[in-house]
Image (cartoon, grey):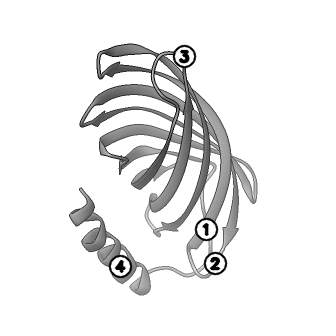
């Protein structure tokens, strides 16, 4: 997965240099967030704009790592700032809950998360994003830890 991120990021930047003018991001976006934090993970992602520079993001998905499989729901509050043309950068914070199985343990956990990333909104109703999300997990059976998640998102805007 890590070998795939550099070519995808390069392609993302190349396409974005040739497209776009004014900033026009819709009120809703629904899609996938595919990432890596010690294993492969996919999330169904929904974004809802609150104001011109604030939105909520909800991600429901699973993670498959070497030792543990997890299912989680995360909610984030994000601040969105335009860069140029159809590019934005964003930062956010939130929390979530989930369940895990692995390493001889299973149970539930809580997560506190941060988020920082960049996104590009095409003239068609498509948005691509790349974000970094540190997640601090808490539970009573398995060791508390910090996961560093990087993901590529693709969302349909409506």
Residue on which the image places disc 2: 83
Q: Nearer the viewer, mark 1 or mark 4?
A: 1
Identify the element where label 2 is drawn: loop
Along the polypeptide, which appears first: circle 4 or circle 2?
Answer: 4
Along the polypeptide, which appears first: circle 3 or circle 1?
Answer: 1
Q: Nearer the viewer, residue 69 or 60?
A: 69
Q: Residue at x 37, y 47 (%)?
A: 37
Along the polypeptide, which appears first: circle 1 or circle 2?
Answer: 2
Q: Nearer the viewer, mark 2 or mark 3?
A: 3
Identify the element where label 4 is drawn: helix
Along the polypeptide, which appears first: circle 1 or circle 4?
Answer: 4
- Residue 133 lies, in percent from the top left, at 52, 51
Q: Height in image: 10 above or below 58?
A: below
Residue on which the image places disc 1: 89
Q: Height in image: 87 above or below 68?
A: below
- Residue 123 lies, in percent from the top left, at 47, 69
Identify the element where label 1 is drawn: strand
């Amino acid at each position: 997965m890590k070998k795939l991120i550099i070519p995808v990021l390069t392609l993302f930047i190349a396409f974005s240099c040739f497209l776009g003018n004014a900033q026009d991001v819709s009120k809703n976006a629904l899609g996938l967030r595919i990432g890596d934090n010690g294993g492969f993970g996919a999330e169904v992602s929904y974004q809802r704009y609150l104001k011109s520079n604030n939105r909520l993001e909800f991600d429901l998905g699973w993670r498959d790592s070497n030792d543990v499989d997890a299912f989680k729901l995360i909610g984030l509050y994000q601040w969105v700032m335009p860069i140029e043309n159809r590019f934005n950068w964003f930062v956010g914070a939130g929390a979530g809950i989930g369940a895990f199985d692995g390493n001889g343990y299973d149970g539930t956990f809580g997560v506190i998360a941060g988020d920082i990333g960049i996104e590009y909104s095409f003239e068609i109703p498509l948005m691509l994003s790349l974000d970094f999300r540190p997640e601090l997990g808490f539970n009573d059976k398995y060791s508390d830890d910090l996961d560093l998640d990087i993901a590529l998102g693709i969302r349909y805007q409506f």
